[in-house]
Image (tube, rainbow, N blue to C red):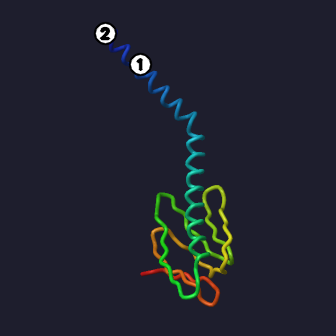
């Protein structure tokens, strides 16, 4: 067997070993980054719903929908709290108006309005 093909096989072997070693070392960090990213996306989503609910006034109806990014979590409305549960915990934000108990699912549209001082949510379609 020529020396060049033995050398090439050794080079590929070292490359593959180094690649798998790097993946093994970095997998926990990559998992942590993915979790932090998901938590940040859920926080921005809950903050947006909070802003819409807090800006409602009698006679105003708003159409609300949440984009369905991969791993999007539903938003729960209950009492005076908007919450989102994700893999490692929950995010809860207070709102001005009392909420009817409901859940806003990603990729669906909802009508949101204030009736009798309570926020009402109705799915469209």
Q: Do the residues labelled 2 and 1 touch (CB within 8 Å)?
A: no
Q: Is mark 1 on a helix, strand or loop?
A: helix
Outermost residue on the bottom side: it is 116
Task: Tell me the number on the disc at residue 40.
Answer: none
- Classify 83 as above or below 4: below
In the image, is 72 to the left or to the right of 94?
Answer: left
Label 1 packing within 10 angstroms: few (<14), some (14-19), many (20+): few
Q: Where is residue 96 in the image (x, y as percent from the top left)?
A: 67, 76
| Residue visible at 46% across and 65% down in the picture | 67
In the image, is 51 to the left or to the right of 66?
Answer: right
**44 or 102: which is nearer to us?**
44
Label 2 packing within 10 angstroms: few (<14), some (14-19), many (20+): few
Which picture quadrant has residue 101?
Answer: bottom right
**105 or 46: which is nearer to us?**
46
Which picture quadrant has residue 79?
Answer: bottom right
Outermost residue on the left side: it is 2
Q: Earlier in the sequence, mark 2 or mark 1?
A: 2
- Classify 39 as above or below 78: above
Q: Position of residue 14 (x, y in %)?
A: 46, 21
Residue at the disc numbered 1: 11
**88 or 99: which is nearer to us?**
99
Q: How far apart are marks 2 and 1 (CA)?
A: 15 Å
| Residue visible at 49% across and 68% down in the picture | 66
Q: Is mark 2 on a helix, strand or loop?
A: loop
Quarter containing the N terminus: top left
Q: Where is residue 15 in the image (x, y as percent from the top left)?
A: 44, 24
Which picture quadrant has residue 77?
Answer: bottom right
Residue at the disc numbered 2: 2
| Residue visible at 58% across and 80% down in the picture | 56
In the image, is 8 to the left or to the right of 117?
Answer: left
Q: Nearer the viewer, mark 2 or mark 1?
A: 1
Quarter containing the C terminus: bottom left
């Amino acid at each position: 067997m020529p020396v060049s093909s033995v050398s090439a096989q050794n080079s590929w072997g070292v490359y593959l070993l180094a690649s798998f070693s790097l993946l093994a070392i970095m997998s926990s960090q990559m998992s942590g980054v993915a979790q932090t990213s998901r938590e940040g996306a859920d926080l921005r989503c809950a903050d947006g719903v909070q802003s819409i609910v807090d800006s409602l006034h009698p006679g105003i109806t708003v159409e609300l929908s949440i984009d369905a990014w991969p791993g999007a979590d539903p938003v729960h409305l209950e009492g005076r709290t908007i919450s989102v549960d994700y893999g490692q915990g929950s995010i809860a934000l207070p709102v001005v108006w009392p909420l009817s108990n409901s859940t806003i699912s990603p990729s669906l549209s909802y009508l949101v309005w204030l009736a009798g001082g309570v926020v009402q949510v109705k799915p469209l379609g």
